[in-house]
Amino acid sequence: MSQGSGMSASTMRAIVVGDRERWIKLVMFFCASVSFLGVLMIFLFIFRESLPAISKVGIRQLFLSTDWRPKSGHYGMLAFTFGTLFTTAVAMIIAAPLGIGAAIFIDQVAPEKVGRSVRRVIELLAGIPSVVIGWFALILLVPFIRNLTGSSGFGMGAASLVLVVMSLPTITTLSAESLKAVPTELKEASAAMGATRWQSIYKIIMPSAREGLMIAVILGMGRAIGETMAVQMVIGNASQATASLVQPGSTLPTRIVQDMGEASGVFRSALFAQALMLLLISVFLVVFIRLISRKRKGE
Amino acid sequence: MKGRRADKAATTVFWVLGIIVVAILGFIIIEIFARGLLTALNPKFIFGKPEAIKSGGGVFPMIVSTLYLVGLSLIISLPISIGAAIYLSEYAKKGKLTGFIRFCLDTLATLPSIVFGLFGLALFVVYFRWSYCLMAGAFTLAILNLPILLRGTEQAMNLVPDTYREASMSLGATKWTTIRQVVVPSAMPGIITATILPIGRIVGESAAIIYTTGLFIRNIPLNPFDTAAPLAGYVWYSQTEGVQADYLRVVNGSAALLLIMVLVIYFLARYLGRKYQEKRLLGG
């Protein structure tokens, strides 16, 4: 307030201070709205760059065709959308039980010290760069699958297993949080009724944490859908749509990374359209989570 | 009796699940270090110049790129996060507007990093004509990190007791003076701790930077508008291109080096976090 020393009338100073307060509030509001500006700009620029492909190739040929032959002007991305959803689904079949199980272990089963160390290990796993996990998978997992199945080793199965590792920390950490949030009275009441630990977990704790566990798995899915580098190193990067775990394929992010270097014109724009597809899937997940958490609050 | 047996079986299963998770991490760390630790700790590798085709290259410009990127990106995102956290925790009333801002933050947190990468390419590299440079990567990562940085900053501010604010206001301080001289300084240790997670993400991020900062350089980047090649992107580049005669050594060494950086950041975070908590418990 010493800045007001030039003014003698205290009312003047009050006005100046009030004015300054209002300006500051405006600046802070601007900082908060950067999140909105960010989302808006990302959407606008990704959309703008996909426009040439949308108008030249057509929405149907672009989004709903599996015909990907950029050299002859075919830019269908459906095989990669399928690849994204398929590898994510396979990964979730393994990672959801594994992650929720590990969370139950941390919160309910393990002695406190052991639980805490496992939680730290998982935090550390979350911080390992995806190129490192990809490299690890490339030198160990791919040869392992090759020896086991007689295939090249690269493919949807290797990609799915990488996604298990990538989504596991998210699922475990968030599940453990929502299990912890279950009221202690509920846990104690169940034990007092003579329930074994497993009965308490299965009949009382998991049902009352249900929404939280669902959100944990959906956010894990979000990580899996967007994972790029680690998957690109092991998926084989073929442009076919395949549900075979030992066949090479692509996801949307891996196709973008694979082709972006040489792409130009409509080809490049088609890759931006794939990013647009990823963006739409992510927004869908966020809205879905909102609906679940609103339901939880409503109960 | 049946319940007892089911309980025993379930307990065993949960122990096995816990052990699997720990084993995955242990396996990754041991394998990466077994292959690359010797190269990663070799001064000639750390401080050497990269080679495009020949063998024997080092990664010093890549390490500098990574650290430079961390610094630049935090300079951009930290003030914005602090400002936004001040708005959300001190000024805004809970309502439709804050709900909408949180929705945008959730969206940013869920968007795949490759989408950020293409966005950075379209806006900073092409539209602003910055070409591939540190600045383009720094802005891209600043937006990518906004949700986690903001959440951490806000938590730190919410932990400042309301009695502090009331005491300051009752002495006649304006809201802004209270924020600037009481709330932010008391939250500062927490804010510093909150930057650790984003730092780790910047160090490990590759999909968002390969189209914004660049993939390969030989000289150390000095100007923020110089092309750079952060280490994580370089691991991917060396592995997929495989043009250096000894690219296996480069990839193994860089991956191990990256892992060392992440481990250092992780333990620093735990150390700072513990220190901060002790301080808070003592009321300091």
Image (tube, coloured by chain):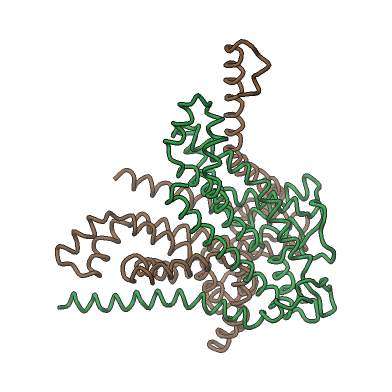
- Residue A15: image quadrant is top right
Left-right relation of A239 to A123: right
Is residue B119 positioned above or below A217 on the image? Answer: above
Who's the residue at 79% across and 55% down the image? B132
The N terminus of chain A sits in image quarter:
top right
Residue B68, given in percent of the width and then of the height, sits at 73, 57
Residue A299, given in percent of the width and then of the height, sits at 29, 45
- The front one of B175 and B4 is B175
Left-right relation of B19 to A146: left
Q: Any idea which chain is the green one in this picture?
A: B
Left-right relation of B271 to A214: right
- The front one of A197 and B178 is B178
Is residue B159 positioned above or below B66 on the image? Answer: above
Residue A278 appearing in the image: no
Report the label total. 0
Who's the residue at 81% across and 72% down the image? B48
- Residue A197: image quadrant is bottom left
Who's the residue at 54% across and 40% down the image? B85
Q: Any idea which chain is the brown one in this picture?
A: A
- The front one of B274 and A47 is B274
Residue B167 appearing in the image: yes
Residue B236, given in percent of the width and then of the height, sits at 70, 69
Who's the residue at 63% across and 54% down the image? B115
Left-right relation of B233 to B55: left
Residue A21, given in percent of the width and then of the height, sits at 58, 25
- The front one of A209 and B180 is B180
